[in-house]
Image: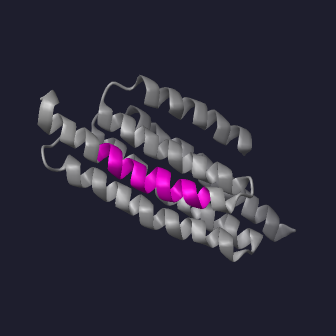
Amino acid sequence: MTETLLTLHIVLALLVLFSRNLLTAVIFLAVYSLFSSLLFFILHAPDVALTEAAIGAGISTFLYVWVIRKTRDGVAS
Amino acid sequence: MTLDLAFDLVVFLFLGSSVLSLVRVIMGPTSADRLIGLNIVAAQILAILVLVAVKEGLHVYLDVALVYDIFGFVGLLAITRFFGKKGDL
């Protein structure tokens, strides 16, 4: 199970790196954070999994989408 | 013994099912397909979290599932909020 999750980590990290659309990259990053939280949970570290679920899946996604939206409306477009 | 085997079997089935659902996230044509795929994968991973928490029998493990449910919903809501304004980001 741990090996499956680590393989998924590599695949999802490569997808985040090589995706051209920014919203797609943010969604891949959310999935990566989800599987990372599950990996910490399986390895008996519930506090690290709790922090990863709160920061990585919630706040980080919200912040990235907000900043992308602001930059598209402002200077970049 | 039998219950442990059943727990392991169901967890592996949910993990395989979420990997199969990941296909829609990876090769969805539009961003809406990827968002729906993220929702499905998040629901299945949440089921795995609750199953492992019940199997271990500790209350701390159940808090992870609760916090992920709340904050994952906030993240999904943020994506849909900024996604729905212009059709695509």
Measuring from the top left, give residue A74's x and y in whole percent. 13, 36
Residue range (magenta)? A49-65
Q: Is residue A54 visible?
A: yes
Instruction: Name which residue lies at 41% across and 49% down.
Output: A60
Measuring from the top left, give residue B70's x and y in whole percent. 43, 67
Residue B1: name its quadrant: bottom right
Instruction: Name which residue lies at 39% across and 42% down.
Output: A27
Up-down relation of residue B56 to residue A14 (above or below) = below
Toward the viewer: A56 or A16? A56
Residue B47: name its quadrant: bottom right
Quadrant in the picture for the N terminus of chain A: top right
Measuring from the top left, give residue A70's x and y in whole percent. 19, 42
Dominant secondary structure, magenta:
helix
Up-down relation of residue B10 to residue A69 (above or below) = below
Toward the viewer: B21 or B81? B81
Q: In this figure, which colouring scheme has been used for the structure?
A: one colour
Toward the viewer: A73 or B81? A73
Q: For this view, does B12 lie left or right of residue A37?
A: right
Q: Is residue B24 visible?
A: no
Instruction: Name which residue lies at 38% across and 48% down.
Output: A61
Up-down relation of residue A22 to residue B60 (above or below) = above
Q: For this view, does B38 lie left or right of residue A53?
A: left
Instruction: Name which residue lies at 26% across and 47% down.
Output: A66
Quadrant in the picture for the C terminus of chain A: top left
Residue B32: name its quadrant: top left
Q: Residue furthest front?
A: A75
